[in-house]
Image (cartoon, helix red, strand yellow):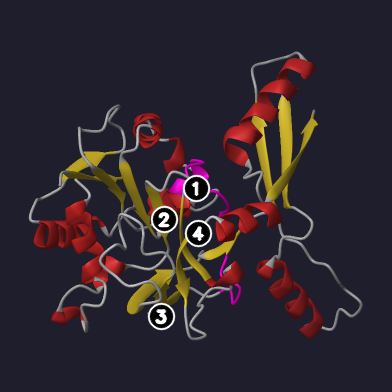
């Protein structure tokens, strides 16, 4: 499986995701700077976490208008797999590739801790190695992860099985509506999530609960 | 031409920052304060001299970047 990791100024989880993709899928991703006009020919594009443009204006707002994003929209329409983690999720919503928005955490605090993540839909490119309802321990680290969407958008997401991950066992860290931690687009090739599965893949992380997510990608090519 | 743009959260969108400000005002002794909402204010200068054309451009700026219309409204004032 060929992959690319897009880097914007202020992104800081790029090395974590490159490590996860390289060790688990066996192929090192190509790194692409946001100022490029085109993405390489790959099966998967990942936007990592961080603080692109210092979260100025709104989280992800400036990055979502970067030169590389035009090709990202074109590739998404062609079915290329796209995964946005944390700031990457915020960028995907700002770019209109995923519905809704991520607002300030309801408690107004940056949260950096472990949550319980429930795999709500296991028929996606990122969850197919897990059972539906599986609970994963996974870290979160964000100040703006409070997912909101218009009432009819939410109903569609729920009815169409597009909630991929939910915070479980009262571990919702940010007030996200319906405990939503990750969603996908209508076609199922774009997934965004606030937690950081790339930081829960080996014993040194404390546990490897999220390793099967990356193993799912091996079947994606 | 100078433009002043006010960006506010839509009605019904929870505003935790506004709530925190409301709480702080209460603890300072300002009683009877409610519905505090925090927004953004942006000023910019444009070469365009025609007010209608300027307004069309700013509306487009708001739709494309300055506001997230899923959660925010915007209001334009030209001077």
Q: Position of residue A53 (x, y in %)?
A: 41, 48
Chief secondary structure of the magenta portion:
loop
Q: What element carries label 2?
A: strand
Name the residue at 51% across, 41% down.
Answer: A96
Marked residue nearer the N-terminal end (3 or 2): 3
Left or right: A130 in relation to B66: left
Report the Cα–Cα distance between label 3 and label 4: 22 Å
What chain does badge 1 belong to?
A
- Looking at the image, which is closer to me, A82 or B44? A82
Marked residue nearer the N-terminal end (3 or 4): 3
Marked residue nearer the N-terminal end (4 or 2): 4
- Looking at the image, which is closer to me, A65 or A206? A206
Q: Is the same chain shared between marks 3 and 4?
A: yes
Q: Is any part of residue A9 visible from this angle? A: no
Name the residue at 25% across, 77% down.
Answer: A209
Q: Quadrant of residue A150?
A: bottom right
- Looking at the image, which is closer to me, A194 or A118? A118
Report the Cα–Cα distance between label 4 and label 1: 14 Å
Residue A100 is inside the magenta segment: yes
Residue wearing tag 3: A115
Q: In which quarter of the image is residue A116?
A: bottom left
Q: What stretch is highlighted in magenta?
A: A92-108
Marked residue nearer the N-terminal end (4 or 1): 1
């Amino acid at each position: 499986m060929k992959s690319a990791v897009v880097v914007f100024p202020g992104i800081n989880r790029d090395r974590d995701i490159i490590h996860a993709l390289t060790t688990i899928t066996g192929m090192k991703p190509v790194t692409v700077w946001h100022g490029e006009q085109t993405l390489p020919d790959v099966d998967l594009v990942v936007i990592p976490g961080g603080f692109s443009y210092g979260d100025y204006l709104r989280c992800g707002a400036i990055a979502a208008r970067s030169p590389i994003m035009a090709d990202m929209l074109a590739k998404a329409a062609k079915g290329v797999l796209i995964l946005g983690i944390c700031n990457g999720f915020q960028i995907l919503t700002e770019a209109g590739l995923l519905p809704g928005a991520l607002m300030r955490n309801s408690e107004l605090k940056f949260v950096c801790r472990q949550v319980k993540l429930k795999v709500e839909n296991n028929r996606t490119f990122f969850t197919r190695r897990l059972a539906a309802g599986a609970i994963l321990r996974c870290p979160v680290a964000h100040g703006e992860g409070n997912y909101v969407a218009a009432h009819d958008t939410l109903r569609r997401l729920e009815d169409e099985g597009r909630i991929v991950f939910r915070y479980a066992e009262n571990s919702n860290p940010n007030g996200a509506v319906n405990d939503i931690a990750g969603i996908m687009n209508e076609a199922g090739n774009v997934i965004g999530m606030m937690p950081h599965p790339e930081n829960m893949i080996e014993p040194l992380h404390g546990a490897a609960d999220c390793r099967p997510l990356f193993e799912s990608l091996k079947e994606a090519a | 031409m100078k433009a002043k743009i006010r960006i506010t959260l839509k009605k019904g969108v929870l505003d935790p920052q506004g709530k925190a400000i409301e709480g702080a005002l209460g603890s300072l002794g300002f009683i009877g304060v409610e519905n505090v909402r925090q927004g953004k204010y942006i000023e910019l200068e444009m070469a365009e001299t025609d007010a209608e054309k300027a307004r069309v451009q700013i509306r487009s700026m708001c739709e494309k970047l300055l506001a997230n219309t899923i959660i925010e409204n915007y209001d334009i004032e030209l001077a």
